[in-house]
Amino acid sequence: MGDNLTTEGFAIEKLLAISDKTGEDVDFILNDAQRHLDTNLTGRDLVPKARQEGVSSYFLARYLIACLGRRNTKAVVISHDQESTQRMLSKVKYYINHFRGPAPVMHNSSANLITFPKNDSMFYIGTAGSRKFGRGDTITHLHCSEYAYWPNPQELIKGLFQAVPMGTGEIAIESTGNGFNDYHRRCFRAYQGASQWTCHFLPWHTFPEYSLPLEEEESLDFMDRLDVDLEEDSLSEILTPEQLAWRRVKLEELDYDLRSFRQEYPMTLDECFQASGESVFHRVNYVKTDLWQTADSSTRILEGHPRKECTYVAGADVGGGVSKDSSVLSVICVETMDQVLEYTNNKLDPEAFAYKCESILKSFRNPYLVVESNNHGILTLAILNKIYPSNMIYRTPSSGNSVEERRLHNLGYRTTVRSKPLMIGRLRSILAHEKSQGGLTVFSPLLRDQLSTFIEHSNGKMGAQDGCDDDCVMALACAVTGINQAALFAESARYKAPVEVIDPFSFDTIVKEMRRGGERFPVRDIRGLDTIH
């Protein structure tokens, strides 16, 4: 069993015991979820998971082994509430009391602290917010349990993370989902490869522990009575009868609340995190596909694009470049109505983002581009107006009188209390339509996530749910705004006959136009006159 395990995993199975479901003491043999973690940890790990997979039990055991086997180990486990903290303390003491080998020499310095004087090591287990950690502390092993339920998590982890040395210290954050919050954002960034962290998603259906044993006749009978309302018919191609039977029992415990079940026992990362409010985008043509590929840490592209025969339209939402809102570029193929590219970066300043847009869109043959002009967008547009084909940048009709006034103020799409509902309504409509009816298909998990948290607030304004982002939504909405114009440009380029490029102000051109116009030309024919006045 221990051939592929780490040193800690091997020691856990050889030295520790655990209580099974019947209350009997048994060897601590790692289950599939625990084994996956043991062999894949990187030192900066996020573990979105289903309930009761033994993740916390594994980290408690791992850190105890570290305290007993390495000098100067400083292990810290933080839980979300006092009750969970007490359970964890009891579990560690159980490991120590049933240790197979010489009894560990330990000392309880406090209710939450166990020290091991022979190794100068310590193990602290506490509740989020009960103790502050800062630069003066050193933590070698940190586990944040049920992080999605912590109060003010971003404030609490500042001191904790500062105490863990880079390169040598371990940090693991584990939790079931709890809507869209800091944990959700961290997991999705890691899942997309845009973070130093590694995401280990543990869906319930991949572990054999989540199934009920059925006889062959019971299995056949169950499959004959699938409940459509519980979505068992669609899941029967993915799950075994034994898994479906287990799922039905759990659903009954949750009063057949499918949403709660998905959050507690997710099959996908999307199910792990669900919006707490009602999204404006109630229906979205989202397709999960391996064709949506990572080009670099900021860019995702649909395999096979760009294509020479296709027309594209792009939309951009501009952030400040200070690690808050992201700058996003989104590209749509007009012929297939597919999202084909998404670029996101929260550290690029507005001017640099303009050059990045120009560089990316060059390979798409400079498609029609719609940039939101609010706030930082005007800086990006000022650069684009110099380096990008001017006629391919969306301009808002201006009420200004002078040419200079129109030139300065009509660059880009300006979202206002009047224009934003129209923009979002157009996007909502095109996302809700079937493909055969001209509907738009999206492939970005990040975009789908933001669409699901885009709501109408109590004051009537539309935007991201508190704690969430909407920059990918706005970039896509900008692209959709320009679809018709992009199609017109493509139509014009496809069917206009080639013409000779001439100077309209040359003497020869003026004479030709005058002769072609004849009497209709607004200059009187002077042939035959003796004098010219």
Image (cartoon, rainbow, N blue to C red):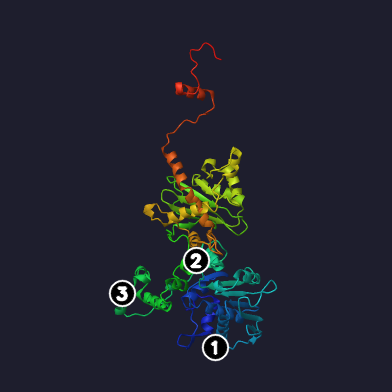
**In the visual, does 304 lie left or right of 112?**
left
Tell which tag, 1 or 2, sits nearer the viewer. 2
**In the visual, does 292 lie left or right of 198?**
left
In front here: 459 or 255?
Answer: 459
Tell which tag, 3 or 2, sits nearer the viewer. 2
Q: Amino acid at mark 2?
A: Gly
Q: Which callout, 1 or 2, points at the residue further toward the start of the chain?
A: 1
Q: Which callout, 3 or 2, points at the residue further toward the start of the chain?
A: 3
Return the mark for residue 178. Answer: none
Q: Is residue 524 visible?
A: yes
Q: Which residue is mark 2?
A: 277
Q: How far across and how far down the image is residue 80, in percent?
A: 57, 76
Q: How far across and how far down the image is residue 192, in percent?
A: 51, 62
Work out how far the residue at label 3 is from the one at label 2, CA to CA, in angstroms. 34 Å
Q: Amino acid at mark 1?
A: His
Q: Which callout, 1 or 3, points at the residue further toward the start of the chain?
A: 1
